[in-house]
Amino acid sequence: MLKATMSEIRICDENNRLLCKHVRSYKDFPRYITDDSHMPPEHLYYKELNAHDGAYYRRWASVYGESMVTLIDRILRSVKHEEQAYNSCKGILHMCNDVPRHIAAEAAQICIDASACKYTYFKKALSRLVNHEPTGNRAAGHLPEHENIRGRDCYQ
């Protein structure tokens, strides 16, 4: 049952017990007034997730240095709608929580130098730095020696 007064709206069950009440609003359309306590947990999660903007992720990245800010900025600019990059930015910045700042900055610089400003590339670069693995930089233009690799003379 719905009861409306000039100042509030009350919703009651069939036994006239009060379920909830809301302050009445006389705003023009759209008239959505959502009380966060009435939202299901999964809606609250996405509301919190989308409460941040690109500036938030850029400020967070500034903790790790200029190269991280550049990386995050390039990721945010690489998509048509900035919101599409928020999960990547958040994932990258969360990965940096457990590593020294200079290593996170170096991994960001590796991504920038390779023009590969992506979550997956950053994850691999950071893993290599943390585990002290070689970066795998080969001399440009040289192929490994192998009997099944034909030279350019085979394609004339």
Image (spheres, rainbow, N blue to C red):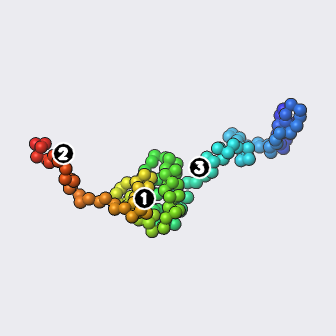
Nearer-N-terminus badge (2/3)? 3
At x 50%, y 61%, the residue is 96
The answer to whether any part of residue 105 appears in the image is: no
Q: Position of residue 21 (x, y in %)?
A: 82, 42
Closer to the camera: disc 2 or disc 3? 2
Nearer-N-terminus badge (1/3)? 3
Dividing the picture into quadrants, the one containing residue 104 is: bottom left
Task: Say if mark 2 contacts mark 3, CB within 8 Å.
Answer: no
Q: Secondary structure at mark 2?
A: loop
The answer to whether any part of residue 152 appears in the image is: yes
Crowding at label 1, few (<14), some or many (≥20) Cα neighbours within 10 Å?
A: some
Q: Looking at numbered disc 1 in the image, what kind of residue is underneath it?
A: Ser
Q: Quadrant of the C terminus?
A: top left
Closer to the camera: disc 1 or disc 3? 1
**Residue tagged 2:** 148
**Residue tagged 3:** 50
Q: Looking at numbered disc 2 in the image, what kind of residue is underneath it?
A: Asn
Q: Position of residue 12 (x, y in %)?
A: 85, 36
In the rendered structure, find residue 127 and report the number of the disc placed on it. 1
Q: Position of residue 64 (x, y in %)?
A: 49, 66
